[in-house]
Amino acid sequence: MSGRDESDDERPLSGNPIARGARLASLPASFAARTTWGLGKRMVGAPAQAVLTDVQRRTADQIFSVLGQLKGGAMKFGQALSVFEAALPDELAGPYRDALTKLQDAAPPMPASTVHRVMAAEFGPRWRDRFPVFEDHPAAAASIGQVHRATYEDGSDIAVKLQYPGAGEALMSDLRQIARLARLFGVLAPGMDVKSLVAELRERVAEELDYSLEAAAQDAFAIGFADDPYVVIPRTITHTEHALVSTWIDSIGSLADIIDHGSHQERDDYGEAFVRFLFAGPARVGLLHADPHPGNFRIREDGLLGVVDYGAVARLPDGLPDTIGRLLRAAVDGDYGTVVDGLRDEGFLRGADLDPEIMERYLAPLVEPARQQSFTFSRSWLRSQGQRLSRPDAEGFGTARQLNIPREYLLIHRVWMGGVGVLCQLGATAPFREILAESLPGFDD
């Protein structure tokens, strides 16, 4: 025995596209094998639903294992997918829910030896002089980097975010491969446009890999939300190309924990803080936090919501477009003629005009949260809307095919839908109309 740590050989974000592609390619092959096994079980009399559930559970376990271990674009895709779990029917969501939720707040960490090599590369061979206390085991591990708790040279508690070696190449390789496997991932979320989701993630990759951009965005949010009654933002201290040092935020968990076992009051309180933060960002900072998965929202003992990870942001120097507020308000007031005209002017309609009455039947249920002083988001509500709009025999399906999302609205739309997904996972009751009046230009003018 050489005494050599075998973990030194682990490359959790290897840039080798062949090796990573083989791991991802194992998913459809394994799914096909499990499906064949399930067919055999049914032929010998096993209950069909029990067999289906077991196949789905095994598939979910493997998807979490592969996406989580690969991190990079695979992990990022899994986290993006996980916020839409609330839209799945119960018979499909049940086997996948736990596996998808794990992707929101956990990932296998880098070995300590790799961590030390990254620290030396970023801060020099005497990096421990600047970080006299450094915890080798990460406090959080996600798609592009992992976070370690440490003490800075001035004695302050800090968070050190380290980018995985080979992150850029691995991200692009993963996302190309996942685009090819869109049909398999569609099993988890029928009706979701997986290819569009992957294309959008690819556009964000370059920005997320640049920690100078993330540091600037985080500083802007920290200034804009100083002394906010709902959220707290960590300040940046220093950064390099592949490391970002921020003030430490003490937390007792994340929104994923509230989704899992929070009380009704906690779901409501943190759900309101979550949505207020998302809407207030563009007006205060000119930026929209564009990665609303629950692991980025930390629960503090003082009741505030700590918000981390500013690698993905939408740059909105003039705030949210007032077109959104004006058209949403017209829909709330039942003026769907104005809604149709406005959507056409902004490039949301393809080809032929839509009858305002058809548009009302399509949009009215989605507008409901803005009509009421408070609204309770739920998985059942989101599922009903998804089923209503995606059935090929439904009027909503035909309407949806005539709608287009202009490029400048794509990221806003994704954050909005992701935020609604999180609120539905929480089952939160929120004063949505009040928040819109405060933070959405054009809604209350």
Image: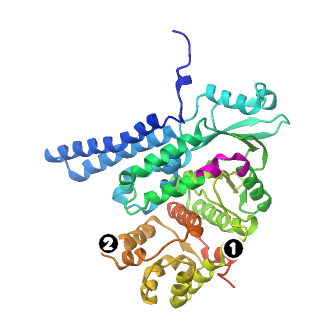
Give the residue at the far right of this rendering.
154
Alpha-carbon neighbours of circle 2 within 10 Å: few (<14), some, or many (≥20)?
A: few
SS category of the residue bearing label 2: loop
Image quadrant holding the C terminus, namely bottom right
Give the residue drawn at x 51%, y 85%: 340
Image: 4 above or below 357: above
Q: Is residue 174 left or right of residue 298?
A: left
Q: Which region shows up in magenta?
A: 205-213
* Magenta residues, dominant SS class: helix
C-alpha gap between disc 1 and disc 2: 36 Å
Could you tell which of marks 1 and 2 lies nearer the N-terminus? 2
Image: 82 above or below 415: above
Q: Mark 1 against mark 2, which lies toward the viewer? A: 2
Residue type, label 2: Pro
Image: 204 above or below 155: below
- Color theme of the render: rainbow
Mark 1 = which residue?
439
Residue 250 visible in the displayed image: no
SS category of the residue bearing label 1: helix
Give the residue drawn at x 61%, y 37%: 164
Residue type, label 1: Ser
Instruction: Tell me where residue 343 appears, x and y as whole percent.
Output: 53, 81
Instruction: Tell me where residue 59 appears, x and y as whole percent.
Output: 35, 45
Residue 171 visible in the displayed image: yes
Q: Is residue 251 left or right of residue 16?
A: right
Mark 2 = which residue?
392
Give the residue drawn at x 44%, y 43%: 64
